[in-house]
Amino acid sequence: MATIKDVAERAGVAPSTVSYVLSGSRKISEETRRAVQAAIEELGYHPRASARTLRSARSEVLVLAVPRDPGKYRAMDGRFAIDISDAARAHGYDVLLMTEPDGVAGLRRVASSGLADAAILMAVREEDPRIAALRALNFPTALLGHGNDRDEAELPWVDLDWEAAVTLALREAVAAGHERIVFWASADHEIAARRGYAMHGLKGAGAAAAETGADIRVHHSSGDPDDLLKRLRRVLSARPRPTALVVQHLILLPLLLDEVASLGLRVPDDLAVVLVGSLPDEPALRALPRIDLPVGQMAEAVSQLAVEAITPPPPTRVPHPVPHELIPPRMAQGPRVAPPAARTPYSPA
């Protein structure tokens, strides 16, 4: 029967390093961890009960990392935090909320101290430094959202298909007869940070423009109310004026709709407004055609992925596929996209 020393010799490491890999009690490089796991599989080594006991000393807590700027409220974050807490509780876990804007230092502290058994990352961005930090610690992690498929290939994630969602909303507007459409994308700071939902939304707008041939103009939103209104006035005062506005994930949506009304435009008679990524069951949004964000489904799925990551299946010669769930979008029940009020000759600006 193979021993821990045999595994260490095969992997070219010290026996203590094998113990650290088995227990997860020390930071081990990805290369070393892979070498140890390969040796375990080749030799058919089964860790002793003491090693398994050390690994099973759990906190029964998940850490939810939600990057936030102080003083800024996002209803979407609160809704996800509540639903994830409910879903985690069903698995016997509590949730520790971490709102550090960068998140790396805090997650390292939590992972190293044993405060939590796994992490759920929100607002995932391309080349997210939190992912690299947690992978270096070999800490169980699940992603709510995805940015760069290459960097996240070994981590489980669930996300709405934002690219398909934006494409669908724009396609619906074109099918209703709109030829001049503005896609109101995520805010500048979200695009600059290369958040996954923002980048995928931009790709969806490009795909819809290529598919439909409609004049789809892309404008970035802003987290500053005054700046947002200036941009909106500029867009809606253009001639010819757009007849449809497809809005993604906009925090300041009520402000935007109020400004549309102040400009003397009626929704949907003068301007069709279509929402992408709205909160489900929001009474104020029921009068608008929209693609709701499936918060409950995503919260349940990512909680399940995080719990499963804590106790992964034993290594086999045929690797287990890492679960990735991309939820297809659908238009919510309710009003459809209204056609333009009047057809006017169109000449591109």
Image (cartoon, rainbow, N blue to C red):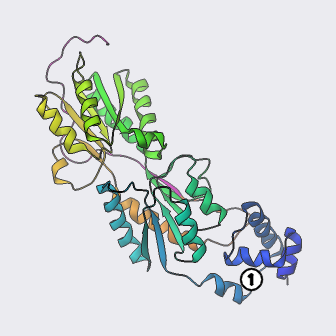
Q: Residue at x 29, y 35 (%)?
A: 227
The prevailing secondary structure element of the residues shown in magenta is loop
Look at the image and tell me whether residue 163 can be seen.
Answer: no
Percent position of residue 205, x then y: 40, 32
Instruction: Check disc 1 and report the residue beneath it.
Output: 47
Look at the image and tell me whether residue 57 can be seen.
Answer: yes
Q: Is residue 64 toward the left or the right of residue 339 in the image?
A: right
Q: Which residues are magenta?
A: 324-349
- Nearest the viewer among 299 and 256 is 256
Percent position of residue 83, x then y: 34, 66
Q: Is residue 270 above or below residue 96?
A: above
- Does the magenta segment cover residue 236? no
Percent position of residue 60, x then y: 49, 80
Q: Secondary structure at mark 1?
A: loop
Amino acid, disc 1: Pro
Quarter of the C terminus within the rendering:
top left
